[in-house]
Amino acid sequence: MIKTIRINEPAGIGRTQEYVRFAVPFARGEALPSASMGIIDPGGQAQPCQTKVLKQWPDGSVKWLLADCAVSVSAGSSQSCKLLVQPEEMPAPAVSVRVTQDPSGWRVDTGAGTFCVDACVFRPFASVQRQTGELLQPGGGLCILSIKDFPQLTPSIDNMSLEDNGPLRAVINVSGRFSEAGRMTDLRFYARLHFFAGSMAVKIEFTIHNPQAARHAGGLWDLGDPGAVLINELTLTLPFAEGMASEIHCIPERGLPSINISGATKLCVYQESSGGCNWQSPTHRNRDGRVPMSRRGYVIEIDGVENATGMRATPRFWCGTRGIGVAAALPSFWQEFPKSIEADEKQLKIHLFPARFPDVHELQGGERKTHLLCLDFAAQPDDLSWALWPVQAFAAPEEYRAAKILLDLPDNVDLIDSFSTAAAILDKREIIDEYGWRNFGEIYADHESVFHKERGTFVSHYNNQYDFIAGAYRKFFATGNSDWERIAADLAVHVSDIDIYHTGQDRQEYNHGLFWHTDHYIDAGLSSHRSFSREHLKSKEPRSCGGGPGAEHCYTTGLMLHYFQTGNPLFMQSVISLADWVLMVLEGPQTVLAALKQGIHSLNLWRNSRGNVRLFPRYPLTRGTGNAITACLDAYEIGGGKKYLDAAEKLIRGTLHPDDDLNARKLLEAERAWSYTVLLVAVGKYLDKKRELGELDSAFVYARAALLAYAEWMLDNEYLYLEKPEILEYPNETWPAQDLRKCVIFFQASRYAERGRRSVFLQKGRYFFENAKNELLLHETTHFTRPLVLLLQNCWVEPHLSENGQFASEQEGEERHLFPQSHSGQPTPYLTLASVVSRTCAELIRTFRQTSLRREWAWLVSRVT
């Protein structure tokens, strides 16, 4: 078995034995977890390989593999290497990473030197040694956080674990809280330390977390909320051993000459703003409503005196003697401003949040920020290209197609390419200067600006609506275009840190949820990446302005794919916590008061609907329930357990039934009911997962029958949205992009329908696709973000809408299981007084059995305050 791995050198710099990490998809049965692996590099040389199985198929074979190896490639080249499964003879590593533990900490021996990681305080290193001796002063490094009332907080370690244990790469996870003089604060931190065999290089991912809840008075989430922490400074300091750094070299940005000075002199590079044309964009307004930056770009200072300036720094610092020393770089130095690095013969300081920035750094309640930095303790002056422009290694697109991990992988070229490119989407960052530590990775929601007539920059953030991350990753898998990977990875980190509400101290229905995109057609104001600002009250009624994370906005598939690409456990945790959150929201808080409140809401719904025949499902037939089903499937796939698959079944049974009165659903009311198609797509995903597991059971039969019943109704009743523009509030390019989802449903129905009905569904799908495509071509605004994301999500279906798009396996035995004649359960009840009273009483009894006075009081207090 051979897998093709593409290797791209992006910076025009030759590389020798540079470590790369990449994901490899496998088809069912291709490789067992016990199989040995090897690499044949682009030069034809056999290389050792370290692997880790992240996911297995139901038969136990490998599904997702994470691999590490070292490659040598020539400058600017694009080459291929081969991953061999069960190679006959592969070389063992010349040196291996060895990690040992004792009460004082963890010792990492890479073969080139040793690192000591303190077990009590994150420094990050208590000691670093090469053959020439100790590189740091006694006591090692120092990590300091300064906030109001706590000028020198240190990160006290609560837990350390070994995520990966070599032989080529070892990863140590560290977590804890910030403290001062034994006093603990609520602020938490997480760190992942990557070590490499035969190398003194280290990659550090450091995350700071404010787990406090925001107060969000009136449902508004402005900067300056009392739950925020105002950070003055966050700095890592490495104090050098005597005589270790007699020279300082710095290359401030690519293409500029190196600055070389004596170690007796202090050199500093400080990036205050992005350096872009719109560097003072209102994107960067602070809690006082002003943009605090006064300097465009960066400044270089020698002994505190300005020496040079520039726009966008990518500094590589080197501190050493006789050609060997310590090098440091931050891969997103200018993109995640403000940042600063300074060094002299005594120490190297990396300012993740610089004290000299003309404002504090506000970490909102429930917000995190992950900083990435790279160090090399045995570097030459021009090293660290691997940190700033790493070699790109990824499985070739043909491997993804052959593995069939993603049934909806698009072609190399599809409809979205008619309207935009990955590079053009990246360029949108410049419009509102979507940079800075909180903003970088976010996508500009330019579709919200269509009614903006005033002068100045209109700010709106997208927050991963319709799962841009997943769409970008699928496009990357299909094309191998690294720009799509860049979009997906940057956005995944941003969403996981900033857009998810990482707190357990707020309302249950908000805790650990995903914030909505900023409000429609209104400037984001001071809401940052949260939904509602007090500034919105100038143009909106207070009763329609406010709220928090909601189940309608829950997207997990992209985060799941990012985990399978990186192995970072924070993303596994994000997927599972989002699934738990959205299930809790749909079920409602488990209190009697919450059940009573929901009962009153249902009673009002019945009163307002008298005279109209409507159904009364346990869960709404909306994108919220559809996204919850998808989240449950993703949580199951990522390792959360079978309870999530069972939860998806419960959601389907509680939402729709094959014998539903579909006319009573009022699905043709587009403004109210359009998102039912999101739910039907999720039902199709559930069927795919059950079929993959070989579980053609009663739950599968029920879901299949329900999907086909609704698809049959769509055949006779659905229409192209813009055929009835008079019923739409905004009849724009988004509606034909939404029509594409109907094509996906018809395709899914064709895969699960009896043979005689398949061509009917495919024909209808082709009709909708061609007409939606033609409509999109008429709109100059189809290049806006929202329609592009909908294209990424759905336009993969085009080549499948043919007779060749039928179900992959049609053995007669499987056909008998797929099409039994009966299904269980009662149709969705009608909305009547009796059904409302019955459900409310059942919910009151259920919650009474599991609640407590403490839980009831907490629910009440969270709403009163």
Image (spheres, rainbow, N blue to C red):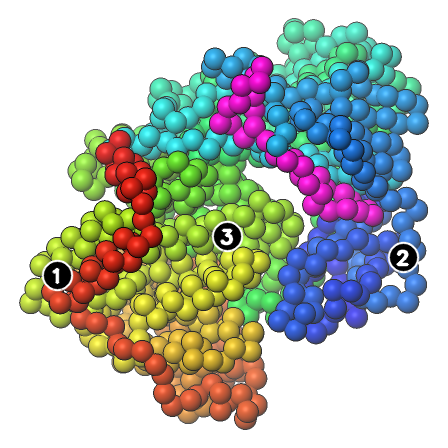
Q: Position of residue 535 (x, y in %)?
A: 27, 30
Instruction: Read off the residue under disc 3.
Output: 576
Q: Of residues 352 and 141, which is closer to you in this image?
A: 141
Residue occupying the point 79% across, 12% down: 345
| Residue 274 spot, x, y in % from top left | 54, 27
Task: Give the residue pinned by disc 2.
Answer: 46
Residue type indicated by callout 3? Ile
Is residue 653 magenta-colored?
no
Q: Secondary structure at mark 3?
A: helix
Q: Main secondary structure of the magenta part?
A: strand
Q: Is residue 428 left or right of residue 393?
A: left
Tell me the magenta residue range: 159-188
Residue located at (76% from left, 8% from top): 265
**Structural crowding at the residue carrying mark 2, measured as other residues with C-alpha within 10 Å and reported as few (<14), some (14–19) or many (≥20):** some
Above or below residue 21? Residue 305 is above
**Answer yes or no: do the residues labelled 2 and 1 have beta carbons within 8 Å?**
no
Q: Residue at x 39, y 33 (%)?
A: 213
Precedes in sequence: disc 2 or disc 1: 2
- To which residue does mark 1 refer? 606
Question: Label 3: how many residues lie within 10 Å, few (<14), some (14-19) or many (20+)?
Answer: many
Query: What x and y, as percent, mark residue 471?
Result: 51, 57
Give the CA separation, mark 2 to mark 3: 39 Å
In this view, the residue farthest toward the left is 611
In this view of the protein, which residue sits in the foreground, 527 or 624? 624
The image quadrant where one finds the N terminus is: bottom right
